[in-house]
Amino acid sequence: MTGNETSTPRPSTTGVTGERADLLAALGQHRHFLRFTTRDLTDEQARQRTTTSELCLGGLIKHVSSVEARWVDFIERGPVAMGDVTTMTDDDLAARAAQFRLLPGETLAGVLADYAEVAGRTDELVATLPDLNADQPLPQAPWFEPGARWTARRVLLHIIAETAQHAGHADIIRESLDGAKSMGG
């Protein structure tokens, strides 16, 4: 493969069947499209904004990786893993905003490697979680219904949707950058 590595070695999920295999396949497909948008890019290109949005390709990889890791922590540890939005400081908000940028000193290869590590952890959890119906209360936040609970299955569907949505954003950014398309014709 030339340029940046865009394939992710998979942890052993041999023997995973049924719903879990379907969830992993869907998530894997959208991860592939997201990573594929970064093929053959330099770090500088991965930092470049190509639309009026603040988004860049390296930042999207960082963001999706962070979101996936946080939701997997939620499956395992509950709402404490998500943090309390009511006590967020300006530094917390700045750190969240930095998720959408490939910062000086960060490399595309580095954020792709981090994403591969997060993906491996998620895949292992999907393969080994005793029950996809296990649920946790959502943290208190204006965007969650008060008192709502999400099952591990619902969280995984959310991760899939988030990854797919940002893979589409990445495709637009990449096409604007150099005309390359990741999805479609």
Image (cartoon, rainbow, N blue to C red):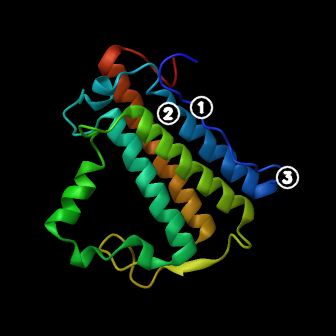
In the displayed structure image, the side of residue 160 where residue 168 appears, left or right: left
Which residue is depicted at the point 56% across and 71% down?
75
Q: Secondary structure at mark 2?
A: helix
Mark in front: 1 vs 2? 1
As rendered, which of 174 and 3 lies closer to the eye? 3
- Res 15 label: 3
**55 on left or right of 22:** left
- Whether residues under marks 1 and 2 lie with C-beta atoms below 8 angstroms apart, the answer is yes
C-alpha separation, residue under disc 2 versus residue under disc 3? 26 Å
Q: Gap between marks 1 and 2, in whole Å?
A: 8 Å
- Give the quarter of the figure containing the N terminus: top right
Q: Earlier in the sequence, mark 3 or mark 1?
A: 1
Picture coordinates of residue 143, whole percent (x, y): 33, 69
Q: Is residue 141 left or right of residue 114?
A: left
Residue 73, horizontal then vertical, whole percent = 51, 68
Tag 3: amino acid: Gly
Residue 185 in the image: state x and y as whole percent.
51, 16
Cα distance in 3D space between marks 3 and 1: 21 Å
What residue is pinned by disc 1? 7
Residue at position x 51%, y 25% in the image: 183
Element under disc 1: loop
N-terminal of the pair, mark 2 or mark 3, is 3
Residue in front for this viewpoint, 151 or 105: 105
Q: Is residue 138 visible?
A: no
Which quadrant holds residue 157? Answer: bottom right
Q: Is residue 163 positioned above or below 146 on the image? A: above
Q: Amino acid at mark 2?
A: Arg
- Residue 15 horizontal/vertical position (percent): 85, 52
Residue marked by disc 2 = 35
